[in-house]
């Protein structure tokens, strides 16, 4: 014998039926706390430090490659002038 039972309810109704707690108020408080901490952290950082933190390493590496390239070019140009 095979029996199938289909229940159509919202997640809130299922949570109430099974006696699980409603975590939405706690989640809202936690998200507000996280947002406040992020705002405080960003406010205390200087824009350049924030930018370097958010830039991927590949972009910073590319900047270093460009600096090396231009320094080599200036060395070559400086050597030819003599």
Image: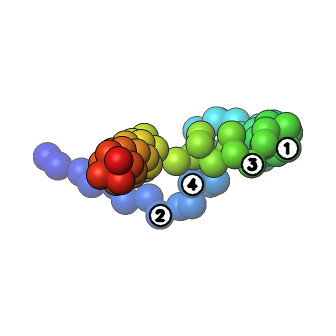
Q: CA distance from mark 1 to mark 4?
A: 38 Å
Are the residues tagged 1 and 3 within 8 Å (C-beta)? Answer: no
Q: Which residue is located at x 47 percent, y 63 percent?
A: 8
Nearer to us: label 4 or label 2: 4
Please give the label number shown on residue 7: none
Judged from the image, the secondary structure of the residue bearing numbered disc 4 is helix
> Could you tell me which secondary element the residue under label 2 belongs to?
loop
Marked residue nearer the N-terminal end (2 or 3) = 2
Above or below, comparing residue 81 to residue 49 in the picture? below
In screen coordinates, is 63 left or right of 39? left
Q: How is the image coloured?
A: rainbow
Given residues 60 and 75, the one toward you in this image is 75
Name the mark on residue 47.
Answer: 3
Of residues 17 and 60, the one nearer the viewer is 60
Classify mark 3: residues with Cα within 10 Å, few (<14), some (14-19) or many (20+). Answer: few
Between disc 1 and disc 4, the foreground one is 1
Judge by depth and name the residue closer to the eye, 57 or 65: 65
Closest to the observer: 51 or 21? 51
The residue beneath circle 2 is 8
Residue 82 percent across, percent down from the top left? 35, 47
In the drawing, what numbered circle is on residue 11?
A: 4
Q: Which residue in the protein does label 1 denote?
A: 43
Cα–Cα span, label 3 and label 4: 43 Å
């Amino acid at each position: 014998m095979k029996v199938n039972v289909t229940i159509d309810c919202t997640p809130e109704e299922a949570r109430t039926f099974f006696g699980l707690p409603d975590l939405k108020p706690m989640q809202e408080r936690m998200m507000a706390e996280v947002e406040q901490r992020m705002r405080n952290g960003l406010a205390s950082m200087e824009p350049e430090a924030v930018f370097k933190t958010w830039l991927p390493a590949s972009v910073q590496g590319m900047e270093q490659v460009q600096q090396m390239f231009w320094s080599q070019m200036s060395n070559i140009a400086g050597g030819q002038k003599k």
